[in-house]
Image (cartoon, helix red, strand yellow):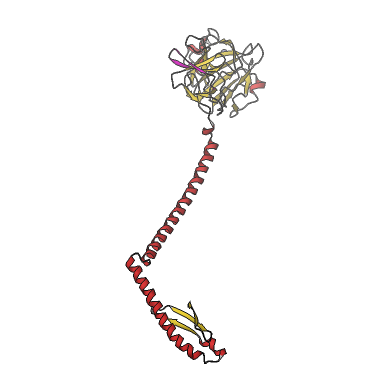
Amino acid sequence: MHDNYMIFPMETMNVTQTYLGKTSHYPHTTGTPKDYPIDIAGADSGRSAVFCPCDEMKITAIKGVGNPNITNTMWLVSTSPVITPTFTDIAFMTLTHQNDDDIGRFKVGDVFRRGDIIGYEGTDGATANHIHLVCGRGSSNNWTESTTGKWVITGDTLPPENVFYVDRNFTKVKNSGGLSWRYLVGKPTVRDTAKDQLEISYSDLIARTGPTTSAPKLGYIIMGIYDNLGSSQSDGYTWYKLADEIYVPSNGTWVKELPKQTEGDDPKVIEQLQKQIELLQQENATKEQQITSLNEQVTDLTTKLQSCENDIPDTETELYQKVQEQAAEISSLNQQIQSLQEQLQHCQEVPEDEKEQNCKVILTCQNNNQYEVELYEKNSLKYQINKY
Ligand SMILES: [Zn+2]
């Protein structure tokens, strides 16, 4: 049980007298102020345990221990709001008739948690083992004498069926005392994302044995998470199966479906995919930078290409001029060579070893190109022109 329900505190319910009783309880409800006691016995004539009925209760008063003239009584108040059939708030209860060796173990301020044993039925101020129980909303730590001479519990006392649910999982009902208890059914589980489940957070949802309004009522379904064992439509409601012979209706808001999560919904998978996306985005940014750089290079090359094209003669006239220039150069060279031929005549009279040194000359053309000309052999004119 996850929500802080206030549940009937004994494993067997045997209500032997209610606040409507005509014997010892009669003066409790016929005077002013009044309270609403019930006498509860357990499984048998022995001393059954009374358990803490909510998440936590604290002792606010203990009276009568060691005093034969005052009936042993313990006051307990919840330390946080509890869910009851009629309110959600702090609640109190008093237990009366525990024996000295039981109640005497505790002191004001002691705390009990759900499921702890608070005490046992007893016979202090009574002839048979039982607990005289009074409860209500808010706090209490005292009693007062009413106009009928009874000591009644102070505070906002209420009929117990308005304060306690009866959990079918915990309490076996032997005798309800004729009171209109609200029963709780169902065993909530925990969320398992691998399963189709349901969340019920509506406290007044009645469970039935079948998926129709004509099926017998089981009680109020305990709020929480349940496995969804299937659904069907009937009588204007969607009926969900929570267990064998436990069905609840929904008008669309009373029950929330919690579908099992596919792999794509798995938070770990989503995280991995997001990391992959980040890496791809980084890679993409790098490639975009590369593309920008390449585009810049293309622009540079295009500019260079355009400047190269300016150097290339692109008309026949220009080409013709180039040829004329070359022809002029060749003509100029021929003239120089002729001049060299004349010099060569002189070279023939130069001693053999000096000749080679002297017969190598550099010619400069009109366009400033330079040529190395080698002359050799005595009686025949031979020369070789290399671009310098
Ligand atoms: Zn009583």
Determine which quarter of the picture holds residue 266. Answer: top right
Counting the numbered discs, the total is 0
| Lateral position of residue 288 relative to residue 174, left or right | left
Residue, x 48% and y 14% (percent of image)?
147
> What residue occupies the far left of the structure in this picture?
317
> Residue 163's x, y, as percent?
51, 19
- Pick the residue in front: 252 or 134: 252
The quarter in which the N terminus is drawn is top right
> Residue 383's x, y, as percent?
49, 81
Determine which quarter of the picture holds residue 309. Answer: bottom left
- Pick the residue in front: 153 or 298: 298
> Residue 68's x, y, as percent?
63, 18
Residue 342 visible in rendering: yes
Is residue 303 covered in magenta? no
> Residue 194's x, y, as percent?
56, 28
Residue, x 63% and y 26% (percent of image)?
106
- Pick the residue in front: 65 or 160: 160
Q: Which residues are magenta?
A: 227-238
Please tell me whether residue 298 is drawn above or below residue 215 in the rendered image: below
- Pick the residue in front: 5 or 193: 193
Is residue 229 covered in magenta? yes
> What residue occupies the far top of the structure in this picture?
22
Residue 159 visible in rendering: no
Please tell me whether residue 141 is drawn above or below residue 123 in the rendered image: below
